Image (cartoon, rainbow, N blue to C red):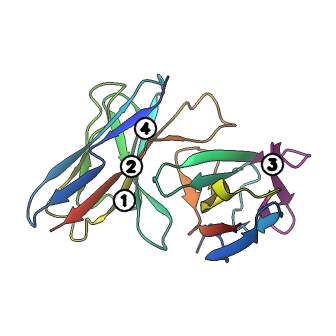
Amino acid sequence: AQKITQTQPGMFVQEKEAVTLDCTYDTSDPSYGLFWYKQPSSGEMIFLIYQGSYDQQNATEGRYSLNFQKARKSANLVISASQLGDSAMYFCAMREPTGNQFYFGTGTSLTVIP
Amino acid sequence: DGGITQSPKYLFRKEGQNVTLSCEQNLNHDAMYWYRQDPGQGLRLIYYSQIVNDFQKGDIAEGYSVSREKKESFPLTVTSAQKNPTAFYLCASRDPRGPNYGYTFGSGTRLTVV
């Protein structure tokens, strides 16, 4: 069974608009971490934001925020005020308690339109 | 600046050859990882190492081998037993004492069988 599901293979957003990238996860552990990474065409994975399962507040990092809905097992990434440089692949990932492995989704390709 | 260096960026392999992908980090991280990325499949764990001279298989270890003789280095050998080695390979490291943080990734090696 998939641990991380990203149902949007591709998304388009107008420059300066906000966009939400969906992510749902599956775990029976009460303790876990959720991450979002950006992968530009150069290939490097860039850490964007982290949400712990016990965190009460939604995580925010600059223009990135994570809409964490624990009961629905959902961890959507919201990018506000999109910029052309935001065009990239975005991956949602989960770390379980041992921390030895991350489970990645299949990614969402975001294109920002001028 | 601290980081992870992967080399080469592009690698071509003939059928039946072994090739070794280099991964070096100067972050003083104990844990290092190798992931394989195929189009539409996200990242899958090949091998990981939590300390020097110790490593464990991930989900898709068949046809690969690793060594961890130094803390800074975690080379991956793609052997001739790997039937479909063409993929993008990402190396990562992590400080296990920092559970709120994700991996630091290298910029990847793209391997093509010719």
Name the residue tied to disc 2. Answer: B108
Q: Amino acid at mark 2?
A: Gly
Name the residue tied to disc 4. Answer: B32
Residue A4 visible at all: no
Name the residue tied to disc 3. Answer: A63
Q: Height in image: A82 above or below B22? A: below
Front-most of residues B29 and A65: A65
Front-most of residues B50 and A82: A82
Q: Amino acid at mark 4?
A: Met
- The stretch of residues the image draws in magenta is A51-78
Q: Chain of mark 1?
A: B
Front-most of residues A102 and B111: B111
Asked whether the residues under the numbered discs 1 and 3 touch, taking CB atoms below 8 Å apart as contact, a structural biologist would say no
- Which element is circle 2 on? loop
Q: Height in image: B47 above or below A22? A: above
- Which element is circle 1 on? strand
**Cα distance in 3D space between marks 2 and 1:** 7 Å
* Quarter residue B14 falls in: bottom left
Does the stretch in magenta take in A71?
yes
Instruction: Indicate the position of residue B114 as horizontal and vertical percent values.
Output: 14, 68
Q: Amino acid at mark 1?
A: Phe
